[in-house]
Image (spheres, helix red, strand yellow):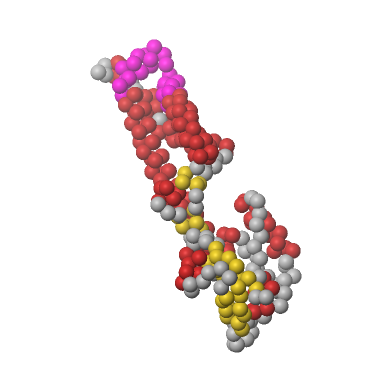
Amino acid sequence: MRQPISVGETLAKTLALRLDDRVVLTMSPRGSSRPTSAAFRVRGIFHTGISELDGFYVEIPLSEGQRLLGLGKAVTQVAVLIDQLDDADRVAASLRAKLADNPDVQVLTWKQGLRQLYEAILLDDLGMYLMMAIIFVIVAIGIFNTVLMSVVERTRELGVMMAIGTSAKRLFATVLVEALVLAVVSAVVGLALGLGIHLWVSSHGIDMAALYGEDVEMAGIILKGKIYSKLSAYVVTKWTVIVIGIVLVSAIYPAWRASRLKPVEAMRHV
């Protein structure tokens, strides 16, 4: 009885293969220049959505692959699946330590084994941080302009406050506190809107095929079906603190300018 083989959908169409068809697979064994061949029976046709897999890959039993390649009981690659992505480096280090007596065995993390995917993720993160930097600059300019105009428009009132005994330090702190209140209120509103959208996306998802008309491929990985958002308390807290910090930094110069006002000149301001 011939061994089963599964063929990629595109390759099956190219070779006009259907289920139960006979196909001959030829390989070059290790250490030999003479190819070996074996007949298989098509028992499955798979579709991954990745052109490199669907058009060029087949799957055969491990024992048959070892026999045709002259590997004996050896294998060329073993993939280890873990539950937490962040544990990859720790697991790889543990495996390296346990396999230290086998110099021919190389342990790679997914970042090393799938370098193209890892670089695509880094590029995507870099684009996100660049976009966030631009947004933060725009926010900083907007807050700076708002606080500065508030100080300019209230120059006379600020001069009166200084004339009745308000110190320059207290006036400086007053403007910063106003900016802090503005930042906190804005952060609360933004969090309410952002978390509301996140809750919807995390439960309903975004259909990639509906957006692009087809499945999206990134570095050989298919983004098929729906994608869902995921947030952690650390990420939310970090970006909230950063936004509040940007607002306070943007308000430093207007606050300093308010603290340098001369009471007599400020009260004459129209």
Q: Is residue 155 above or below residue 130?
A: above
Front residue (pair 183, 216): 216
Residue at the extreme front of the image, as rendered: 20
Magenta residues (range): 152-180
Is residue 104 in sight in this rendering? no
Q: Main secondary structure of the magenta part?
A: helix
* The image quarter in which residue 232 lies: top right
Front residue (pair 209, 18): 18
Where residue 102 appears, as percent x and y from the top left, is 72, 71
Q: Is residue 238 above or below residue 121?
A: above
202 on left or right of 96: left
Q: Residue at x 61, y 83 (%)?
A: 36
Where residue 225 appears, as percent x and y from the top left, is 50, 49
Count of all numbered marks drawn on residues in the image: 0
Q: Residue at x 66, y 70 (%)?
A: 61
Where residue 165 appears, as percent x and y from the top left, is 41, 14
Q: Is residue 1 above or below residue 50?
A: below
Where residue 164 appears, as percent x and y from the top left, is 39, 12
Q: Residue at x 52, y 60 (%)?
A: 48
